[in-house]
């Protein structure tokens, strides 16, 4: 297969797997991460083909889609690349990238060793920020039946990945438990600058949220 044929086949596989997914990790999330990863790769000088493949496959390893097991998806991705005729070295590189992609509550190392991995991870984390990040956060919380906000339940720091996975805290807590922390975890300079802008937008949103919650925006 040519590189374009490999990309097309992977795209079809992932689209079929994630189409109409309702937690904010759907096909359109993949598409946004894919496009953003390409833009970052061009800025940072990363290998485009590796970035494209890893970006398309990055979420099939997520624990949310594999009954809590984050290893299954990475193995599927590796096997798919081999079946597409890709070199074993590429398959192993992509396997490693997507196997260390997830945030996992900040308690498990997700450090990327390659520039390509850093680019894809940055693109994925950027899609958790800004206006789209806000929308995805509430989509996920709603899909899990979580409270919108509960001022009696404070954000927390998780001791391990298991406690992070089992958390059922209100959706707004997620901003403090993960989202607002991401700007300091970006790998590349290009992503860091964009993350700062999107984070500021989220902080403004939170101020407005609390203002409306307490009826402080009411103009008497």
Image (cartoon, grey):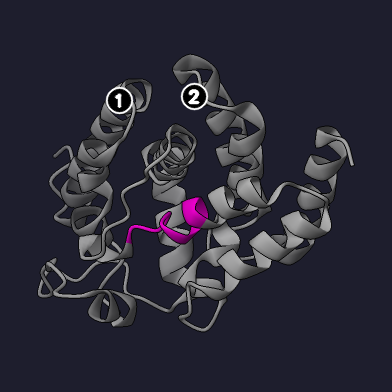
Nearer to the camera, 133 or 189:
189
Q: Residue at x 24, y 67 (%)?
A: 149
- Whole-number angstrom distance, CA of label 2 to CA of label 1: 16 Å
Asked if residue 49 lies left or right of residue 209, the reply is right
The spot of residue 176 in percent (x, y) is: 18, 55
Tag in front: 2 or 1: 2
- Asked whether residue 178 appears in the rendered view, the answer is yes
- Whether residue 56 appears in this view of the structure is no
In which quadrant of the rendered image does the C terminus lie?
A: top left
Residue 71's spot in the image, x, y percent? 50, 73
- Report the residue at 80% width, 35% height from top: 3
The spot of residue 66 in percent (x, y) is: 55, 78
Between residue 52 and residue 67, name the one nearer to us. 52
The stretch of residues the image draws in magenta is 96-103
Residue identifier under label 2: 40
Image quadrant in which the N terminus is located: top right
**On the image, numbered disc 1 is attached to which residue?**
197
What is the secondary structure assignment of the residue under circle 2?
helix
209 relative to 3, above or below: below
Image height of 113 relative to 41, above or below: below
Pinpoint residue 142: horizontal percent, then vertical percent.
45, 70
Judge by depth and name the residue closer to the eye, 16 or 197: 16
187 above or below 133?
Answer: above
Q: Along the horizontal axis of the image, is 1 left or right of 218?
A: right
Residue depicted at 82% across the width and 50% down the height: 85
Determine if the magenta segment contains residue 84.
no
Q: How many marks?
A: 2
Closer to the chain start, of discs 2 and 1, is 2
Would residue 204 be found to the left or right of residue 37 on screen?
Answer: left
């Amino acid at each position: 297969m040519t590189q374009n044929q490999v990309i097309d086949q992977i795209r079809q596989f992932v689209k079929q797997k994630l189409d109409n997914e309702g937690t904010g990790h759907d096909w359109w999330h993949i598409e946004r991460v894919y496009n953003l990863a390409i833009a970052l790769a061009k800025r940072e000088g990363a290998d485009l083909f590796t970035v494209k493949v890893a970006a398309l496959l990055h979420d099939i390893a997520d624990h949310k889609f594999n009954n809590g097991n984050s290893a299954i998806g990475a193995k599927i991705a590796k096997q798919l690349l081999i079946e597409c005729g890709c070199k074993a070295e590429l398959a192993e590189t992509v396997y490693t990238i997507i196997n260390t992609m997830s945030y996992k509550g900040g308690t498990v190392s997700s450090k990327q060793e390659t520039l390509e991995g850093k680019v894809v991870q940055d693109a994925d984390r950027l899609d958790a920020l800004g206006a789209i990040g806000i929308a995805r956060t509430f989509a996920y919380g709603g899909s899990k039946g979580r409270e919108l906000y509960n001022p009696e339940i404070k954000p927390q720091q998780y001791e391990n990945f298991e406690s992070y996975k089992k958390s059922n805290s209100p959706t707004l807590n997620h901003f403090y438990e993960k989202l607002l922390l991401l700007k300091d975890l970006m790998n590349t300079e290009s992503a860091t600058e964009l993350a700062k802008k999107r984070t500021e937008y989220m902080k403004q949103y939170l101020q407005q949220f609390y203002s409306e919650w307490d009826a402080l925006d009411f103009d008497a």
